[in-house]
Image (cartoon, rainbow, N blue to C red):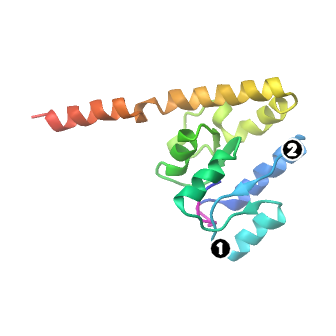
Amino acid sequence: MVGRVSAQKDPHYFINWLRQLTAAGVNFQAVWIGGGNGAQTEALRVAGVRVTGWLGPEDVTRELDELDVYAHSAAWEGYPISVLDAHARGVAIVVRPIRPFEDLAMIANMGTAAEQLARAARTSDTWASWLDSNRAYWNAALSDNAVPEQRTQLLWAWTRP
């Protein structure tokens, strides 16, 4: 997860999701890239999550580059930049099914991904296949955010009478 440790980012949802992964037999190291509320930060640490504290952009990029999966647990958002950042770094992404992500495929939904991750993590072949499928899903889902498409849309908007 990336962001301020706060009710909006819902660290308790994140912790509960990590517990599902653990119960399913997934071996992982969880990281929260950011800092914030003392009690919620302590709850993350007690749950075994490494909380980085506030980092500069280059350090955030380095942390993202170390991830296999980015899990976004926010309870509410517009459209989170951190999801776009993780996608830009080629990280597989699972998100909480909140309003901006209402039509998620199962492979991208935190609500269903724990079981999929557990199955995929059993062998390196299935893990690699799951990561590739997840990245392909997000490439398609975010295709309108590509520079050529944005250019086309901006030119259309700017040239309208």
Answer with mark 1 or mark 2, whichever residue precedes in sequence.
2
| Residue lying at 45% horizontally and 29% vertically, measured from the top left | 143
| Residue lying at 78% horizontally and 35% vertically, measured from the top left | 117
Q: Determine whether the residue tagged by mark 2 lies in a helix, strand or loop.
A: loop
Name the residue type under label 2: Asn
Q: Quadrant of residue 12?
A: bottom right
Q: Nearer the viewer, mark 1 or mark 2?
A: 2
Picture coordinates of residue 20, whole percent (x, y): 82, 46
Check the image and name the residue furthest to the bottom: 38
Quarter of the picture holding the C terminus: top left
Give the side of residue 158 with respect to residue 138, left or right: left
Tell me which secondary structure the magenta stretch mostly adopts. loop
> What's drawn in magenta, residue-wise?
3-8
| Residue lying at 87% horizontally and 44% vertically, measured from the top left | 27
Q: Determine whether the residue tagged by mark 1 lies in a helix, strand or loop.
A: loop
Name the mark on residue 70: none
Name the mark on residue 27: 2
**In magenta segment, residue 31:** no
**In magenta segment, residue 6:** yes
Q: CA distance from mark 1 to mark 2?
A: 27 Å
User: Residue 84 or 113: which is nearer the viewer?
Assistant: 84
Picture coordinates of residue 67, whole percent (x, y): 69, 45
Name the residue type under label 1: Asn
When the figure is inspected, residue 29 is found, relative to residue 53, above or below; the finding is above
Q: Quadrant of residue 70?
A: top right
When the figure is inspected, residue 130 is found, relative to residue 154, above or below; the finding is above
Q: Quadrant of residue 119?
A: top right
Give the side of residue 77 with respect to residue 48, left or right: left
In the rendered picture of this protein, how many numbered marks are placed on residues? 2
Q: Which residue is mark 1?
A: 37
Density class for disc 2 (Cα within 10 Å; few <14, some 14-19, many ≥20) is few
